[in-house]
Amino acid sequence: MAITYTHPEQLVDTDWVAAHAADANVRIVDMRQAGYADGHVTGAVYVSPGAIRDAKASPTFLPTPAAFDEMMAKLGISDTTRVVVYDERGGIFAARLWWILNYYGHANVALMNGGWVKWTAEHRASSTVTPTPAAGTFTARPQPHWVATASDVVAAIDKPGVKIIDARTQGEIEGRDLRNIKRGGFVPSSIPIYWEDLLDAQQKTFKPADELKKLYEDHGIVPSQEVIAYCQVGMRASVDLFALHLIGYDNLRNYYGAWEEWGNRDDLPLATRK
């Protein structure tokens, strides 16, 4: 018997979005890099992928609660709103909003499984109208256990009961692809689990629960452990965290400084592959 998702509520299918996008308590958020003006899910509001990380806000790199409150309120998102996010790349942008909403105490958030790829493959309706939702009332309630700082990651290296996941490409991990970062390599003791390995390659939907469970457990990552994930700016790591939470892992943290911080700081430990 196949196992099921522990948190199926954080993943909705395109049928559900088509049926509920106009519901008063639902807000669909488009987080694609481009294309919103050319067509989007009817009623969807737009958030730029880069708008929810402050590169100057060390050590957490999070927008302030007040700034996040204002951003959500302008989107028509209130404390009781069911938020559903999608992008065009299987969740690389959308999952980061899922994560940051959870960090700010709003767990009523899901991804549209398959995102824009599946929506358009099914020839579903789109709109070029930009909605103007009534302002919401959003109250950020920070949940510090969702975020890790560089010092938290240093403390987690080789620590029993803690696993560090690297969601980047092999080229980045091996230092061949620096992406404008000073140092190449990886966090010592980290385990590479590339974010796209969690998805069906064609539909960009998340793999079934049993496949996800096997992938992580084959790497020695089990639900009783604390997991810290990182990438370059916290996007790909959020996909790993989303998949982990989907199958019942609850002690999850995003190192939001990510390789952009780690690779540019000479005082942090570095591992390399020769």
Image: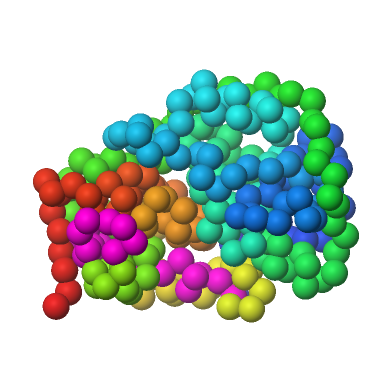
Q: Is residue 146 left or right of residue 136?
A: left
The residue at the point 44 percent across, 74 percent down is 214
The residue at the point 30 percent across, 34 percent down is 58
Asked if residue 199 lies in the magenta stretch, the reply is: yes
Q: Is any part of residue 48 visible from this angle?
A: yes
Instruction: Indicate the position of residue 61 as horizontal and vertical percent values.
Output: 37, 37
Instruction: Indicate the position of residue 66 as horizontal and vertical percent values.
Output: 52, 21
Above or below, 136 relative to 130: above
Q: Is any part of residue 160 visible from this angle?
A: no
Q: Which residues are magenta?
A: 178-200
Q: Quadrant of the C terminus?
A: bottom left
Which secondary structure dominates the residues rendered in magenta? loop
Q: Nearer the viewer, residue 153 or 248?
A: 153
Asked if residue 183 lies in the magenta stretch, the reply is: yes
Q: Quadrant of the N terminus?
A: bottom right
Q: Nearer the viewer, residue 272 or 220?
A: 272
Instruction: Indicate the position of residue 113 as horizontal and vertical percent values.
Output: 67, 62
